[in-house]
Image (cartoon, rainbow, N blue to C red):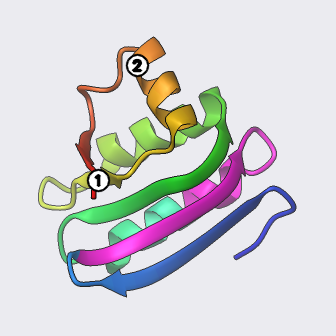
Amino acid sequence: MSDTSLDCERVDRPVGRTLIVRGEIDLASAPAFRSQLAAVLAEARSPGYVDLAGVTFMDSSAIAALVEADLNAAPDKAIVLVDPSPVCDLVFKALGLAERFDIVRS
């Protein structure tokens, strides 16, 4: 799936089904991001991984999509954020969300 500012790819990794996100998650690309999050959670056995290493920008619509997906996920289908980019880390810390999500770093 590709948008002018966002690229998402769902892949199988040894840890599980992973959504690899590259580019900008903003108001224009948030609907596609939200759709890809839902798809990876539906495809994942448990949990669904979201690789944010390639994210160069995220606004409140990205945060809303992540929180919504996390709230709507089945109890056995948590979201795990993988290698958030420095931009993501900054946003998570500024909003007090660094503790809300399970974050792993490689």
Counting from the top left corner in percent of width and height, residue 3 is at: 81, 65
> Is 100 situated above or below 30?
above
Q: Which SS class for mark 1?
A: strand
Q: Is residue 89 magenta?
A: no
First to last magenta residue range: 16-35
Point out the tag, 1 or 2, that comes first from the N-terminus: 1
Identity of the residue furthest to the right in this view = 4
Residue at the image position 68 percent from the left and 47 percent from the top: 30
Q: Nearer the viewer, residue 73 or 40?
A: 40
Q: Is residue 14 left or right of residue 33?
A: left
Give the residue type at disc 2.
Lys
Q: Is residue 33 magenta?
A: yes
* Mark closer to the observer (1, 2): 2
Residue at the image position 50 percent from the left and 44 percent from the top: 85
- The Cα atoms of the two marked residues, 1 and 2, are separated by 18 Å
Q: What residue does disc 2 label?
A: 93
Q: Residues within 10 Å of mark 1 (few under 14, many from 20)?
A: many
Which disc is residue 79 wearing? 1
Counting from the top left corner in percent of width and height, residue 102 is at: 22, 43
